[in-house]
Image (cartoon, grey):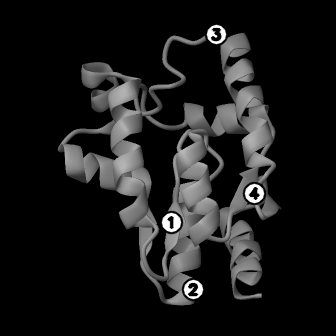
């Protein structure tokens, strides 16, 4: 939801010379519809089921994988991610995330559609405990290139 996962992931992958896999993009490719259309037409549950089905393939081999913010919430997904990957939480305060999310066309972020600011705050708070369990936390407020450099350094050790 605006932390820069896709942009930073692509930059890190390019720097490392490995593939970049964006789970939302894989879902769109597999379903033949945008994430927003999938949510609207089939619902969040169908989206989450497809997300879980594609997660294992996304994590295969050496690659940088950008995960949607909700993909880590299912315990089985989180266990798989922890077994196969170094996890990095791109952390930014909610007001920053909301400003960034507002820059994309309406409907692109279906979890925000129709929600009040208080509801979005609750969604954000509900995810924080899982996000904070990541191997690393990186401040996602600086420019994406700086964030990507920090993630790259963490990855290569």
Within 10 Å of the Cα at label 3, are there few (<14), some (14-19), or many (20+) other Cα atoms? few
The earlier-in-sequence mark between 1 and 3 is 1
Residue 116: assigned label: 3
Q: Secondary structure at mark 1?
A: strand
* Rendered view: 147 above or below 111: below
| Residue identified by numbered label 2 | 15
* Rendered view: 73 above or below 140: above
Query: Who is closer to the viewer here, 42 or 102?
Result: 42
State the CA–CA distance, disc 1 to disc 3: 30 Å
| Residue identified by numbered label 1 | 65
Within 10 Å of the Cα at label 2, are there few (<14), some (14-19), or many (20+) other Cα atoms? few
Judged left or right of residue 69, residue 136 is right
Residue 45: which quarter of the image?
top left
Counting labels gives 4
Judged left or right of residue 84, residue 63 is left
- The image position of residue 126, as x and y in percent, is 73, 28
Marks 1, 3: nearer the viewer: 1
Judged left or right of residue 71, residue 90 is right
The earlier-in-sequence mark between 3 and 2 is 2
Q: Residue at x 48, y 37 (%)?
A: 104
State the CA–CA distance, disc 4 to disc 1: 14 Å
| Residue identified by numbered label 4 | 134
């Amino acid at each position: 939801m605006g932390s820069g996962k896709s942009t930073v992931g692509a930059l890190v992958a390019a720097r490392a010379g490995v593939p970049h896999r964006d789970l939302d993009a894989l879902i769109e490719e597999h379903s033949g519809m945008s994430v927003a259309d999938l949510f609207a037409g089939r619902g969040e549950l169908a989206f989450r089921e497809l997300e879980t089905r594609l997660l294992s393939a996304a994590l295969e081999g050496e690659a940088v994988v950008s995960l949607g913010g909700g993909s880590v919430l299912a315990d089985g997904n989180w266990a798989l991610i922890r077994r196969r990957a170094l996890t990095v939480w791109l952390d930014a305060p909610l007001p920053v995330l909301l400003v960034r999310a507002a820059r994309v066309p309406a409907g692109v972020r279906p979890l925000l559609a129709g929600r009040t600011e208080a509801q979005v705050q609750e969604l954000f708070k509900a995810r924080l405990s899982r996000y904070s369990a990541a191997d690393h936390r990186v401040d996602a407020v600086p420019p994406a290139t700086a964030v990507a450099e920090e993630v790259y350094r963490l990855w290569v050790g």
